[in-house]
Amino acid sequence: MRAAHAYRVLSPVASEDPALTPEGCRRAARCRACTVRQNALFVNLTYDELDAIAWKVPEETIPAGETLYRSGDQPGTIFILRSGLIKLETYLSDGSYRIVRLARRSDLLGLERLLDSPCDHTAIALADTEVCKVPLEVVRQVMAHQPWLSTQMIRHWHQALQQADGWLAQYSLGAGRQRVARFLVDLHDLSGDDQGRITIPSRDDVGAILGITKETASRLIADFHRTGLLTKIDQQRATIQRAPLAGIAEGE
């Protein structure tokens, strides 16, 4: 029965069932092959269970600099990051902004929507980013039949809180040179590709993340480039010498 169901879902045939349309079959195949799923929301679903909801989950590519959602928005989905990097911004009363967290591959965004609360932050792509948009009704449907998903959601929420707490601690300590070195190392570890390439945010964003001026951020990044600890590939991407930068981050 399982094998027949799998073949039926993945074989495009004419049907009124949206899961059996070519697009529904493509989404099912995408979800089955997705490596992000092992660290994201539906890790414990069987293929049959995954096929039943995959057709409802579109994906979208957010170009660098574009907004996924704004603070106060009420999207009908939560978002799973398949690739790329997203900054979460909060705006202060004086009109300035701070970046409170960076979201990377397999992270979930918009979890507050499960409480019917508007989005807390503005989410903007720092690099070309691919997300899956999971309708709230799908998440609630799975939670109603799969009790483990509630624990999974709490785990993701806890991870987000830990990241935010760690952010405040590690990026508010040390001189500017240490903070920038620590940030570059984190970019490498959290979002670097197979070749170790990272996408460096704008100098304004680096300043907002580290609590330094954009001029200081620009000068320190230029210093690392001049001394060979950072090699620019283009305007946004670079490679770094991780070990010596980690030493600087630790105050060595």
Image: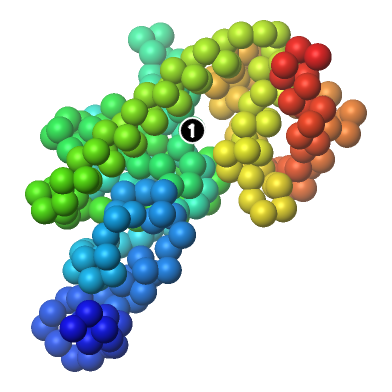
Residue 181: x and y in percent read 72, 24
The quadrant of the picture occupied by the N terminus is: bottom left
Question: Is 19 placed left or right of 236 in the picture?
Answer: left
Dot 1: element = strand
Q: Quadrant of the C terminus?
A: top right
Residue highlighted by disc 1:
102
Q: Residue at x 21, y 66 (%)?
A: 49
Q: Nearer the viewer, residue 173 or 217?
A: 173
The colour mode here is rainbow
Image height of 43 relative to 3, above or below: above
Q: Residue 51, relative to residue 60: is it above or below? A: below
Give percent across and percent down for residue 6.
26, 81
The amino acid marked with disc number 1 is Leu
Residue at x 76% of width, y 12% of height: 251
Q: Residue placed at 83% from the left, 24% from the top?
A: 223
Question: Can residue 127 be seen here?
Answer: yes
Tell me what residue is drawn at x 38 percent, y 30 percent.
Answer: 160
- Using the image, determine if residue 80 lies above or below residue 60: above
Quarter of the image for residue 148 reads top left
Q: Farthest residue in the bottom direction?
A: 14
- When asked about the image quadrant of residue 178, the answer is top right
Relative depth, front residue between 232 and 9: 9
227 relative position to 171: left or right: right
User: Left of 172 or right of it: where is 162?
Assistant: left
Tell me residue 163's x, y (percent): 45, 26
Quadrant in the picture for residue 201: top right
Query: In the picture provided, is 67 more to the left or to the right than 44?
Result: right
Near mark 1 (Cα within 10 A), the count class, few <14, some 14-19 or many ≥20, is many
Q: Is residue 218 visible?
A: no
